[in-house]
Image: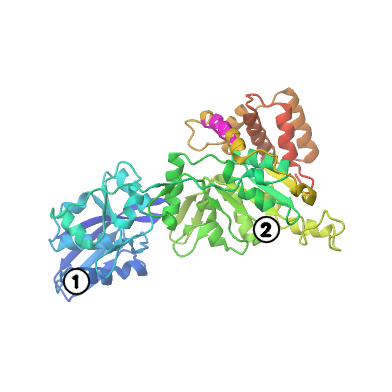
């Protein structure tokens, strides 16, 4: 008899169904696992053997073969322990044969039989719901998996609890979803004194998910401004929260199964590797660009990042997803985020200050910002010079708008865009608009069209730059509550495109 249990193998946020087959046959005593297992899966036989011994279950002196089907798909991770144990218990006739047919299981076994939480409970629950199966997982993963509607989640603390549940001795209650994490009280935009133009750029970036480059001398407030972007963004919608949590589940970042409505804010150091930023490594884990999905990726000291890392950002910024290619698989992760990059104008940082600039002015500025290639620079919708704030201004009381006031305008603009793109799966905000839809929603009036034509010819805007100006202008019009794209909207969008220290 061949006993069967079911689990998943992760390819990015996608969960591929895996059939775990177990056969006990005559022959020399052995326990073999086949089907392209990695080291962690191969070692499952020892963990399963010890866990069964802790329950006073001895393996027969026969040949035990476990096959993970499809056999040509690589299997990685310790979550195969529990389904292998289920298939083996079914083959030993300890569990009824029909029990495991409608169950998808994942979990790591300790040597004493307790179940250890694993990564990916949330996408596994999504796969179980799609297959009309229940999900069996460790108790510590149950609160996370229970967020998915349509799938019954059984969370057990030990393998013994699993056996008692499926034999009807002590049934387990379905798991309950974890708590919704309260939105944190972040820094307020009112804390920033001066820098009104940069604040306006932040508002536009937040409203339409536009990428923003801040260039200014050290201490001018670039990092302070970027840290306050989250305070003006609306909370994640339920669909966005689940979408974001799928990625965070694979990275092990969900705290006690709770799902947060706060948008991610990631700020990697400029020494981070390509695998850390883009994703990859031995098991192709999500990188910072994916962990910032539906949120903000802040890259301070932008030119200091390795050139190869910066160039690899070009495709994720354009498409909203990243493909990690491996010899045996291609893994795709979502990465729709707002990129906020901050940079000094030159290596010493004082290009615009004649009293403090180095002797290599102005060539040092060209060399330093030249580390940002033209194609990458072209992907920034907004480029802002952040001048230093005079110390006399720092003594003045805060008079600017609070984050709550700006957030109200951002939320209203996003509501307009939500209605505009309703029913379009690949478009959610103005930054996603393209093709015929962009031409329709961002059609400028006569004066605005004439201005755009002159600017495109004068500053030699690329086709990408031309369309990005239209997207930003559309967002500015939404913030203004205007259906039509007027000259003032387009002029402001062009002003952010044609920064004095950066080219078009």
Measured as percent of width and height from the top left, residue 329 is found at 44, 58
Question: Which residue is pictured at 48% across the width and 36% down the height?
Answer: 425
Residue 403 is one of the magenta-drawn residues: no
Q: Is residue 362 left or right of residue 189?
A: right
Q: Nearer the viewer, residue 54 or 489?
A: 54
Q: Is residue 119 left or right of residue 325?
A: left
Q: Nearer the viewer, residue 218 or 284?
A: 218
Residue at the extreme bottom of the image, as rendered: 28
**Which residue was labeled with disc 2?**
301
**Which residue was labeled with disc 1?**
53
Residue 412 is one of the magenta-drawn residues: yes
Q: Which residues, given as a range, are shown in magenta?
A: 410-418
| Residue 357 figure quarter | bottom right
Helix, strand or loop at disc 1?
helix
What is the image's colouring?
rainbow
Measured as percent of width and height from the top left, residue 361 is found at 85, 59
Q: Nearer the viewer, residue 413 or 49?
A: 413
Question: Which residue is pictured at 73% across the width and 27% down the height?
Answer: 487
Question: Which residue is pictured at 57% across the width and 45% down the height?
Answer: 230
Helix, strand or loop at disc 2?
loop
């Amino acid at each position: 008899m061949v006993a069967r249990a079911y689990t998943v193998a992760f390819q990015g946020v996608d969960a591929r169904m895996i059939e775990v087959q177990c056969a006990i046959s005559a022959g020399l005593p052995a326990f073999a696992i086949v089907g392209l297992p990695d080291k962690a899966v191969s070692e499952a036989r020892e963990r399963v053997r010890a866990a069964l011994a802790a329950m006073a279950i001895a393996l027969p002196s026969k040949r035990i073969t476990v096959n993970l089907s499809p056999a040509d798909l690589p299997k990685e991770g310790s979550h195969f322990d529990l389904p292998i144990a289920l298939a083996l218990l079914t083959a030993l006739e300890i569990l009824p044969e029909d029990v495991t047919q409608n169950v998808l299981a994942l979990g790591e076994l300790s040597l004493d039989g307790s179940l250890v939480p694993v990564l990916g409970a949330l996408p596994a629950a999504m796969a179980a719901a799609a297959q009309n199966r229940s999900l069996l997982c460790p108790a510590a993963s149950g609160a996370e998996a229970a967020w998915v509607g349509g799938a019954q989640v059984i969370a057990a603390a030990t393998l013994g609890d699993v056996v008692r549940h499926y034999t009807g001795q002590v049934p387990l209650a379905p798991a309950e979803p974890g708590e919704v994490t309260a939105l944190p009280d972040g820094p307020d935009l009112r804390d920033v004194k001066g820098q009104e133009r940069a604040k306006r750029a932040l508002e536009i970036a937040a409203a339409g998910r536009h990428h923003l480059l801040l260039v200014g001398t050290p201490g001018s407030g670039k990092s302070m401004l970027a840290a306050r972007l989250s305070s003006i963004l609306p909370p994640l919608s339920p669909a966005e929260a689940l979408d974001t949590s799928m990625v965070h589940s694979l990275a092990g970042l969900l705290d006690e199964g709770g799902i947060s409505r706060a948008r991610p804010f990631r700020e990697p150091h400029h020494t981070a590797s390509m695998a850390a930023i883009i994703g990859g490594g031995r098991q192709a884990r999500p990188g910072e660009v994916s962990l910032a999905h539906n949120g903000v990726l802040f890259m301070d000291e932008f030119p200091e990042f390795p050139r190869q890392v910066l160039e690899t950002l070009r495709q994720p910024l354009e498409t909203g997803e990243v493909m990690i290619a491996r010899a045996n698989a291609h893994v795709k992760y979502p990465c729709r985020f707002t990129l906020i990059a901050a940079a000094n104008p030159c290596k010493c940082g004082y290009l615009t200050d004649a009293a403090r600039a180095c002797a290599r002015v102005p060539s040092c500025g060209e060399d330093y910002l030249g580390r940002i290639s033209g194609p990458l620079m072209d992907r920034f919708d907004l480029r802002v010079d952040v001048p230093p704030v005079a110390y006399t201004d720092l003594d003045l009381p805060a008079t600017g708008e609070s984050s709550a006031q700006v957030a109200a305008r951002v939320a209203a603009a996003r509501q307009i865009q939500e209605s505009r793109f309703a029913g379009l799966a690949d478009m959610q905000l103005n930054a996603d608009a393209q093709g015929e839809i962009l031409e329709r929603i961002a059609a400028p009036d006569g004066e605005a069209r004439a201005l755009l034509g002159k600017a495109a010819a004068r500053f030699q805007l690329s086709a990408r730059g031309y369309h990005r100006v239209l997207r930003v202008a559309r967002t500015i019009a939404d913030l203004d509550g205007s259906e039509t794209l007027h000259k003032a909207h387009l002029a402001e969008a062009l002003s952010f495109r044609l920064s004095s220290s950066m080219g078009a």
